[in-house]
Image: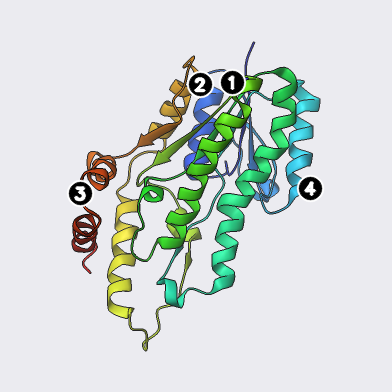
Amino acid sequence: MNKIVLVTGASSGIGEGVASFLSEKGYVVYGTSRKPKNERDFPFKLIVLDVLNTETIQTAVQLIIKNEGRLDVLVNNAGMGITGPIEETPTEEMRAVFNTNLFGAIDVIKAVLPGMRRQKSGIIINITSIAGYTGLPFRGLYSATKGALELITETLSMEVKPFGIHVVNVAPGDFATNIAAGRYHAPISEQSAYKEKYQINLDLMNAHVNSGKNPTEMAKKIYAILNTKHPKIHYKVGGFLEKFSIVLKRMLSDRMYEKIVMQHYKL
């Protein structure tokens, strides 16, 4: 029986790559977008879902269950980026990114769990980030949201395992997507104490995304996870240095690791 998959944030980037790849592999895939009527055609069903609107979340999940009778897989991908010095980033923007990347993801999980518990099976895959393992300069809020989702994944995995449900996360490094275009950037003012360093890091971040890996690599990893009988909790997909940075953080003292990160980001 073909598995029924829900991929949030599937109109572009990693979400689109995952939804398209799984469709090609025979899965019945529902992707979501806040405004799907304005999108081009996709090789999967694209439906309305805004992670900031619980009514649209419930409606989307109920539609899938009505059409297919079940929902087997959630790929919790929808999210947003944010950059800026902590001191100069508006608090309302901080709350907005937590509402999208963390609480929005949790609300989608809440919507799919009742059905998965009834059928005594399912897998929830949270898309986090390698940035969630380290506080990065001028990306602290983004790192914090993804790090928090990593911990939620660990907790949820224990809570729902008795119901036959697996919860895992996949942490990507830099991928060639349009996240930079949709990211909130704290304005760079001429009077800012961080002006020069922040601009250098913005240019560095955008260069990393532009030269990043193909989203198909994420799709292949998720496909492999779906075909693993006993999946792990944490997966990482990225370049050697990105993944090695996590190992290095465990090995070195806090200040030594901090020094290496600051040198990398030209601080």
Q: Which residue is mark 2?
A: 226
Within the image, what quadrant is residue 158 found in? top right
Q: Which residue is mark 3?
A: 252
Question: Which of the two discs, 3 and 4, sits closer to the camera?
Answer: 3
Q: Secondary structure at mark 3?
A: loop
Mark 4 residue crowding within 10 angstroms, few (<14) / some (14–19) / many (20+): few
Question: Which of the two discs, 2 and 1, sits closer to the camera?
Answer: 2
Q: Secondary structure at mark 1?
A: loop
Label located before the other in sequence (2 or 1):
1
Q: Secondary structure at mark 2?
A: helix
Looking at the image, do the residues carrying marks 2 and 1 touch, with CB atoms under 8 Å apart?
yes
Question: Which of the two discs, 1 and 3, sits closer to the camera?
Answer: 3
Mark 2 residue crowding within 10 angstroms, few (<14) / some (14–19) / many (20+): some
Distance, label 4 to label 1, CA atoms, is: 26 Å
Distance, label 4 to label 2, CA atoms, is: 28 Å
Q: Looking at this view, is 14 or 74 the one in front? A: 74
Label located before the other in sequence (1 or 3):
1
Q: Which residue is mark 4?
A: 55
Q: Secondary structure at mark 4?
A: helix
Q: Which residue is mark 1?
A: 27
Distance, label 1 to label 3, CA atoms, is: 43 Å
Q: Residue furthest bottom?
A: 191
User: Going 33% across and 64% down the picture, which residue do you hit?
Assistant: 137
Q: Amino acid at mark 3?
A: Leu
Distance, label 3 to label 2, CA atoms, is: 34 Å
| Screen quadrant of the C terminus | bottom left
User: Going 66% across and 49% down the picture, which residue do you hit?
Assistant: 51
Q: Amino acid at mark 4?
A: Glu
Q: Is residue 161 visible?
A: yes
Q: Amino acid at mark 2?
A: Leu
Q: Looking at this view, is 230 or 251 the one in front? A: 251
